[in-house]
Amino acid sequence: MFSQLYTVLSQDEICADPSAYLLDRRRRYLSENVTVVQPKSVQSVRNLMRLCSQHGIAVTPQGGNTGLVGGSTAQGGIIVNLSRLNAIRDINIADNTITVEAGCILQNVQAAASEAGRFFPLSLASEGSCQIGGNIACNAGGLNVLRYGTMRDLVLGLEVVLPNGELISHLQPLHKNTSGYELKHLFIGSEGTLGIITAATLKLFAPAQTVETAWIGVESVEQAVGLLSAIRNRFAERVCSFELVSRFALSLSLEYSNLTPPLDASWHILLELTDSLPDENLSSCLADFLYEQGFHNAVIAQTGQERHELWTLRENISAAQSRLGVSIKHDIALPIARVAEFVTSCGTVLRQRYSDIRIVVFGHLGDGSLHYNTFLPDVCDNGVYAYEEAINEIVYRHVLQQGGTIAAEHGIGCLKRNLLPLVRNSEELALMSAVKKQLDPNGIMNPGKLLPELI
Ligand SMILES: Cc1cc2nc3c(=O)[nH]c(=O)nc-3n(C[C@H](O)[C@H](O)[C@H](O)COP(=O)(O)OP(=O)(O)OC[C@H]3O[C@@H](n4cnc5c(N)ncnc54)[C@H](O)[C@@H]3O)c2cc1C
């Protein structure tokens, strides 16, 4: 196989030392018996896919490898790392779009948009290393979903290499197009199981000229949900981020970040309002509003440094919690009105079953998604996974009781593939399987991911 690769790729497209690309971000999944390639052109990707299709070789696309469900690791076959397909092809001011290759790092796309006087709103704590192709393949969410939607809402067009090497390309900066099925949506969120995304045309927006960031203490999640509703009613599209942080999650981040607490409360909200026009009154408007609504335990950042520190506290939670050891993570979404009930009832049952369990709750309450991570103090290493099925049973039972989903923004990968039937019925799974068979009849694209084993 290795020698055949040289017929379709140049020598420097085949990774001589693949060690940096084998282990996933959570150090849970290790790729074995794989060859890692880094194509420099779309043509190389096409040639490679043709070869793999002819020989039935498994192909796993890989972006920045920041995914949290084991999607870009593989057992056998070829890992196609997209890092070198990283050109910004076009910035179109009239249409407010940017066309980029899949291997562009998200932060570089944000910077390119900013240099052109525009704003690309997708923002995640992993933005310094995740790639646009990975963001699209996972339908990434992040911090600004409330105002700008998920990655699906930001993609106008895609270029994709199909498993047989054929190319479909619709990168025109069209904001409307009703000519037939909108095929791009099949690939958005498909986690590399239907084809390799090589480029995308994305929406741009006006940059914010006014940004107000507040940290608000609340007594309960229920109160946080009430505040969200009131804030949206008052500030409408200006509400960009509404992040929930538990007292415990904040304490971990404070210690890790070496910062002083903004305030003390059982639950915390990081709120950001933005406006594309200068508005000197927004800060006092927000202060008055919070006061009138009875939220007196709150601070509004007065300087860029203060704003930066508030965001640092939020963004460092992921890294800070890893000091507790290995966790069983849950990336869930719920109807917003039912988040509080979930947090109370699920926490109660988990603590009854595991008296010393530590639960780190934080996330994007504004769109109903939460990171709900559980730690067992006596088992700090991967041995904790022996408890995963039992803990998942409790957590997902409560998620389903509240009408939620088991995968909000990280996808299914291999971690949750056999749990997919919890949230998709047999008709849906059959349809997904039919789509997969049509596009990838030999089953070479990212095998063992997303679809359950038994369909
Ligand atoms: C600290 C931290 C914070 C995070 N916060 C968030 C968050 O707020 N919101 C959120 O949504 N996610 C978050 N994530 C998860 C992760 O960063 C995102 O899922 C991200 O979109 C993955 O991009 P990636 O380039 O790293 O993809 P990878 O991890 O490399 O791949 C992810 C999946 O996409 C597929 N894939 C990758 N590139 C392509 C391509 N070009 N074509 C087809 N398939 C492809 C892979 O096969 C795999 O199935 C976070 C992760 C970390 C570590």
Image (cartoon, rainbow, N blue to C red):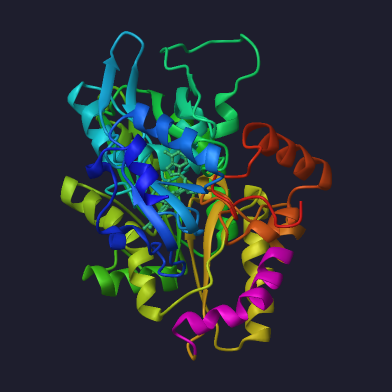
- Give x and y (percent) for residue 253: 32, 69
- Give x and y (percent) for residue 115: 18, 26
Mostly what secondary structure, the magenta segment? helix
- Give x and y (percent) for residue 385: 56, 78
Residue sitting farthest toward the right:
427
Query: At 43% across and 41% down in the image, what residue appears?
Result: 135
Q: How many marks?
A: 0
Vertical order, 191 against 121 (above or below): below
Q: In this rendering, would 288 be left or right of 115?
A: right
- Give x and y (percent) for residue 280: 24, 30
Q: In this rendering, would 368 be left or right of 52?
A: right
Residue 66 magenta-highlighted: no
Q: In this rendering, would 417 be left or right of 147?
A: right
Residue 384 magenta-highlighted: yes
Quick one: 243 or 232, which is closer to the camera?
Answer: 243
Quick one: 136 or 252, which is closer to the camera?
Answer: 136
Query: At 39% across and 33% down in the image, what residue appears?
Result: 45
Vertical order, 99 against 219 (above or below): above
**Residue 73 quadrant:** bottom left
Q: Is residue 321 visible?
A: yes
The boundaries of the magenta stretch are 379-397
**Residue 444 quadrant:** top right
Quick one: 306 or 161, which is closer to the camera?
Answer: 161
Vertical order, 215 against 85 (above or below): below
Residue sitting farthest toward the bottom:
378
Query: At 54% across and 37% down in the image, what residue appears?
Result: 54
Quick one: 452 or 69, which is closer to the camera?
Answer: 452
Q: Is residue 63 visible?
A: no
